[in-house]
Amino acid sequence: MKFKHLVGLLALSLLMAASQVLAEPREFKIDEEHFSVGFLVGHIGFKYQLGMFLEASGEFVWDEDANDLHSGEVVIQADSVFTNHDRRDRHVRSGDFLNARRHPEIRFTATEWEPTDDDSGVLRGDLSLRGQTHPVALDVTINRRAEYPFGHEQYTVGMSMRTVIQRSEWGMTYALEGDLVGDDVQLILEFEAIAQ
């Protein structure tokens, strides 16, 4: 009986090892038609201003079976910022905030993925903004993984990501005094990524 039990455990171990060998990382490209990058920042304590970046792209390499991220990057065009007010948008692009002319790209490069379960985790990486790079951590929820029901009909993963940064850490100190514009900026990423 013990021998049969040992053989069963050995067979199970071999099957698990074989499945790990067969698992391979896949490249995913974020679908630019289904990619939203937003932010919220306080305005004089009266409200939170909602804004978006209208141009962004990204890709990552992920071993889904092992839940192991090999690499990942998101690039946002700084001058694509949109807050539904032309004068404010020009100000946000200026040297007081994004300095988009001198630093046209905002770039996030993933460095570590820490899953908490099959559908959530913490994504750590480096955020380059205004010529400065600092680490950030994003809370990630994996919403759905499936063949897309129409259109491209390819395997797709949908994710939601959230984090809060202090803009002053990247040199954006304009209007901090008196909390005219808040230091804390909530970042919101929503996207669908297609397996390549």
Image (spheres, grey):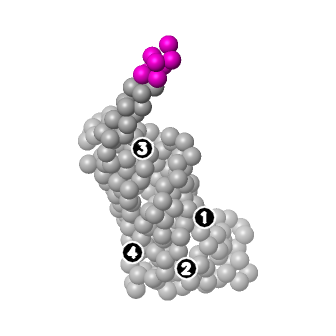
Q: Is residue 183 left or right of residue 62?
A: right
The label number, if any, that marks residue 135 in the structure image: none
Query: How far apart in space, not on screen, are marks 2 and 1 (Cα)?
Result: 13 Å
Give the residue type at disc 4: Glu
**Residue shown at 67%/65% (left/top)?**
47
Work out whether mark 3 precedes mark 4 in sequence or the reverse, and give the earlier one.
3
Work out whether mark 3 precedes mark 1 in sequence or the reverse, and give the earlier one.
3
**Residue shown at 42%/22% (left/top)?**
7
Which residue position is annotated with label 4?
A: 105
Which residue position is annotated with label 3?
A: 66
Which residue position is annotated with label 1?
A: 164
Secondary structure under tag 3 reads: loop
Which residue position is annotated with label 2?
A: 170
**Residue shown at 59%/75% (left/top)?**
167
Give the residue type at disc 2: Trp
Give the residue type at disc 1: Val
